[in-house]
Amino acid sequence: MMQPASPITLEVDLGDRSYPITIGHDLLSDTGLVGRHVAGKRVAVVTNTIVAPLYLERVVKSLEAAGKLVTTVILPDGEEEKNWASLMKVFDVLLAERCDRKTTLVALGGGVIGDLTGFAAASYMRGVPFIQIPTTLLSQVDSSVGGKTGINHPLGKNMIGAFYQPQAVIADTGTLNTLPARELSAGLAEVIKHGAIIDPPFFDWIDANIGRLVEKDPAALAYAIQRSCEIKADVVRQDEREGGLRAILNFGHTFGHAIESGLGYGQWLHGEAVGCGMVMAADLSQRLGFIDGATRDRIAALVKAAGLPVTAPDLGKERWLDLMEVDKKNEGGQIKFILLKPMGTSVIMPVPQDALLATLQACTRQ
């Protein structure tokens, strides 16, 4: 095993809303790091029942050492908990503890905790500061960066939320040591996505190093996180509120969100659904003549090598279409897809229904 490199810091350049992303090993043991980004005296750490026994004490001690008064909120784990009731639990504690508008919320956990805590911060007293401490690969490479916050609704994923940027993102790669293999694979889906839509040399690197990534090689993971954050930060800088360009980061998500909603939140992990969704989007891209069969097969093979599903559940044609119609990219009732044209370049467009139905048939479990 290589020794972990020293921490690196990237900047998300959004003018007066800019913030640093610090990536490194054992950052949670740096007693000053989290506290440096907390302006006020009060802090509320939001986490879940899986992460709390592993890392909560370390974060609380670090904040208390910086002279902060800390409140904690521990929610149940799982995508199915990313809902209104969990959001209200956070508000209940903040109000009961008389947390004021100088209180900083800290999201300690994966994408669900990050999205939900960010939305709570955007809404509580019309906006309080928050810090992201992502503890899963998926949240370190994707969901903690860019200020998308929100909760799910039974009729659609991430349909209720706000764009709200954190004060800082602190990605401790040491937290990946306790990550189950299935969760690691889910994060690799978003890493592969960044290569496929924007950076073919990065895709080649992932393809060559997928074995090291699956085995949690620290140096390989650190590079994958760094490059993913660089790509995402650059896209967010150009299009913070998804007016155009940023929508390409949803490659694979139109199919993926339909899988998550159709099966019920929590049946498949978000990254599993996105991985399968990318295979479907690549198939659709090939049917429309935008990429060749070899590129489509290469994407499917890499998704499979990452430990992700490549065959979608059979939800039935009508159900698929209904679920994909509830998508934030859609306008005027047309389902829009992010397609590769060619590899490393994306196009967002409605597609002919016969091609879409052919992809659904080819990619689902019959």
Image (cartoon, helix red, strand yellow):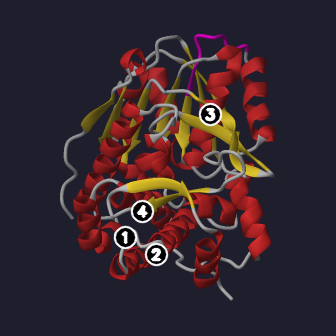
Say whether disc 3 or disc 2 marks the residue closer to the N-terminus.
Answer: 3
- For image coordinates 74% across by 51% down, the residue present is 156
Secondary element under disc 3, as helix, strand or loop, is helix
Q: Residues within 10 Å of mark 2 (few under 14, many from 20)?
A: many
Which tag, 3 or 1, sits closer to the chain's start?
3
Instruction: Sort mark 4 into few (<14), some (14-19) or many (20+) by Cα contacts within 10 Å.
Output: many
Foreground mark, 4 or 3, reads 4
Q: Are the residues at dot 2 and dot 4 in contact (C-beta closer than 8 Å)? A: yes
Magenta residue span:
98-105
Q: Spatial distance from mark 1 to mark 2, Cα to Cα? A: 8 Å
Residue labelled with disc 1: 214
Residue at the extreme bottom? 366
Say which amino acid is labelled 3: Thr
Q: Residue at x 43, y 41 (%)?
A: 245
Q: Are marks 4 and 3 in contact (CB under 8 Å)?
A: no
On the image, the x and y values in percent for residue 328 come to 64, 45
Label for residue 307? Answer: 2
Q: CA distance from mark 4 to mark 3?
A: 23 Å
Q: Give 225 or 351, whichever is nearer the viewer.
A: 351
Residue 40's x, y, as percent?
51, 11
